């Protein structure tokens, strides 16, 4: 007659086994609710998505800024817009008058404050003008020069048509030294210029739609903005479906 073999004791006592069984039973009962089960799934997906999103590489600031200048003299320059960048090297837009071209003209100009900030430039009329590149291109795609300041557009004070007007939108690349960590960061500003009216009533108009930089130090693509996590979006979709199913089963109104 065979003697029953004793099972190996792996450290599980009857009390701990009972506790484990009870916890498992409670967990299964809790998950019987569709909304609870999908909520748990959404939390898991969210936790998986968060590491991929931190830190965000592209930092984008949307703007809805507009400004106009007429044919009157503007003097040496007034700052009308500031793009707040990390550290002390902000990007500003000035409006000023300059008599070094004929006829005397009013300008919009981009300028990087402090050292270490540069704008891609072209040379025209013996002046630096900001160089624009196409959407999805990066700074590495251009071999043009660089300068701490560059004109955007100009309009003669006689009210003649504007010079180097920018289409909507125009992407102008720049880079700057982030004084918080001494790193170089690449960015762009999206803007447009136009001229309305004629003669003494003409106006040079500027619109700024936003600006961005890449926090990782990569050469940012023009028009790049942060993208929401696909996984997180899916998790939110699951939550919505679960809520709808719950409402249908209980026949209660969801407001």
Image (cartoon, rainbow, N blue to C red):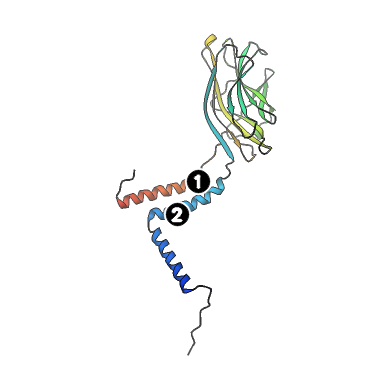
Q: What secondary structure is marked by label 1?
A: helix
- Please state the horizontal and vertical placement of residue 145, each as a whole percent of the image: 69, 27
Say which residue appears at 33% left-offset and 45% top-offset.
254
The residue pinned by badge 2 equals: 40
**In terms of image quadrants, where is residue 90?**
top right
- Residue 192, compared with residue 157, is above or below; it is below
Work out whether residue 197 or residue 3 is closer to the camera in this orientation and state it. 3
Q: Residue furthest left?
A: 251
- Residue 37, compared with residue 176, is above or below; it is below
Q: Crowdedness of circle 1 by 10 Å Cα count: few (<14), some, many (20+)? A: few
Q: Point out the image quarter for the C terminus.
A: top left
- Please state the horizontal and vertical placement of residue 163, each as a whole percent of the image: 60, 17
- Please state the horizontal and vertical placement of residue 151, each as a whole percent of the image: 63, 21
Mark with earlier residue (1, 2): 2
Q: Which mark is residue 230?
A: 1
Say which residue appears at 54% left-offset and 9% top-offset.
200
Say which residue appears at 46% left-offset and 74% top-offset.
14
């Amino acid at each position: 007659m065979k003697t029953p073999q004793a099972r190996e004791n792996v450290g599980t006592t009857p009390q701990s086994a009972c506790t484990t069984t009870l916890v498992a039973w409670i967990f299964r009962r809790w998950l019987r609710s569709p909304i609870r089960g999908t909520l748990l799934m959404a939390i898991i997906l969210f936790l998986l998505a968060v590491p991929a999103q931190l830190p965000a590489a592209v930092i984008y600031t949307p703007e809805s800024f507009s400004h106009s200048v007429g044919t009157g003299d503007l003097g040496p320059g007034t700052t009308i817009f500031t793009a707040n960048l990390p550290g002390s090297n902000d990007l500003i837009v000035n409006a000023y008058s300059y008599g070094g071209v004929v006829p005397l003209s009013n300008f919009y100009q981009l300028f990087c404050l402090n050292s270490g900030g540069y704008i891609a430039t072209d040379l025209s009329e013996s002046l630096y003008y900001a160089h624009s590149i196409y959407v999805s291109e990066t700074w590495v795609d251009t071999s043009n020069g660089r300068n701490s300041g560059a004109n955007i557009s100009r309009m003669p004070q006689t009210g003649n048509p504007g010079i180097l007007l920018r289409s909507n939108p125009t992407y102008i690349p720049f880079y700057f030294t982030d004084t918080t960590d001494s790193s170089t960061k690449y960015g762009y500003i999206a803007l447009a210029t136009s001229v309305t009216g004629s003669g003494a009533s003409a106006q040079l108009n500027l619109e700024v739609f936003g600006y961005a930089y890449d926090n990782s130090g990569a050469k940012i693509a023009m028009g790049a903005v942060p993208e929401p996590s696909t996984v997180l979006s899916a998790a939110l979709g699951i939550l919505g479906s679960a809520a709808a199913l719950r409402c249908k089963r209980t026949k209660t109104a969801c407001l």
